[in-house]
Image (spheres, rainbow, N blue to C red):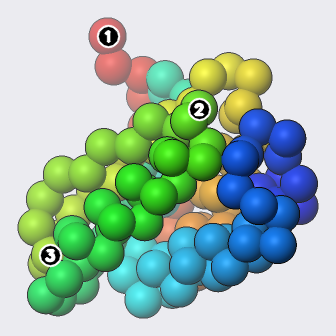
């Protein structure tokens, strides 16, 4: 968690960072079903839920991308089942790993490694 809160690459005020991490934790605890580390260095988080999930995810990642512009997010799917793909430049992989680890902790460790796609 320290990487997510102390990074100098984030423009979110320091006092607000734990709240943002808590928002991700809440999302992952409620909806994450699996985490995949992909061969290209990105992470895919599978989520499932009900009405409002897509909107909740999009709102959170839009706010996160506004303060941490090194993140690239892509959402595909519906409220019932969606994927959240997250990538960062190579120099920020420690932060992506910290985010993926938090998601894994909240899915009971449901992760896998996917091969690179050409």
- For the point 49% across and 23% down, the residue is 40
Which residue is tagged 1? 118
Of residues 11 and 5, the one drawn nearer to the viewer in this rendering: 11
Give residue 93's quadrant in the image: top right
52 is higher (above) or lower (below) than 20: below
| Image position of 53 (left or right of 17) | left
**Looking at the image, do the residues carrying marks 1 and 3 touch, with CB atoms under 8 Å apart?**
no
105 is higher (above) or lower (below) than 62: below
- Mark 3 and mark 2: span between their CA atoms? 26 Å
Numbered disc total: 3
Disc 2 vs disc 1: which is toward the camera?
2
Give residue 25's quadrant in the image: bottom right
* Residue at the extreme top: 118
Of residues 20 and 42, the one drawn nearer to the viewer in this rendering: 20
Q: Which mark is residue 68?
A: none
- Mark 3: give few (<14), some (14-19) or many (20+) Cα within 10 Å: some
Residue 54: percent from left, percent from top? 21, 69
Q: Which mark is residue 70?
A: 2
Residue 37: percent from left, percent from top? 52, 43
- Mark 1 and mark 3: span between their CA atoms? 29 Å
- Mark 2 and mark 1: span between their CA atoms? 23 Å
In primary-sequence order, the first of circles 2 and 1 is 2
Q: Is residue 45 visible?
A: yes
**Looking at the image, do the residues carrying marks 3 and 2 touch, with CB atoms under 8 Å apart?**
no
- For the point 61% across and 23% down, the residue is 89
Q: Which mark is residue 79?
A: 3
- Mark 2: give few (<14), some (14-19) or many (20+) Cα within 10 Å: some
In primary-sequence order, the first of circles 1 and 3 is 3
Q: Is residue 109 visible?
A: no
């Amino acid at each position: 968690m320290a990487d997510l809160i102390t990074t100098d690459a984030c423009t979110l005020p320091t006092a607000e960072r734990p709240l943002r991490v808590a928002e991700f934790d809440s999302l992952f605890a409620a909806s994450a079903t699996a985490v995949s580390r992909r061969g290209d260095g990105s992470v895919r988080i599978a989520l499932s839920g009900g009405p409002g999930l897509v909107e909740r995810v999009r709102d959170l990642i839009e706010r996160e991308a506004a303060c941490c512009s090194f993140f690239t997010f892509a959402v595909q799917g519906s409220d019932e089942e969606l994927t959240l793909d997250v990538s960062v430049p190579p120099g920020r992989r420690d932060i992506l790993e910290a985010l993926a680890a938090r998601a894994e902790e909240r899915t009971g460790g449901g992760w896998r490694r996917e091969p690179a796609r050409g």
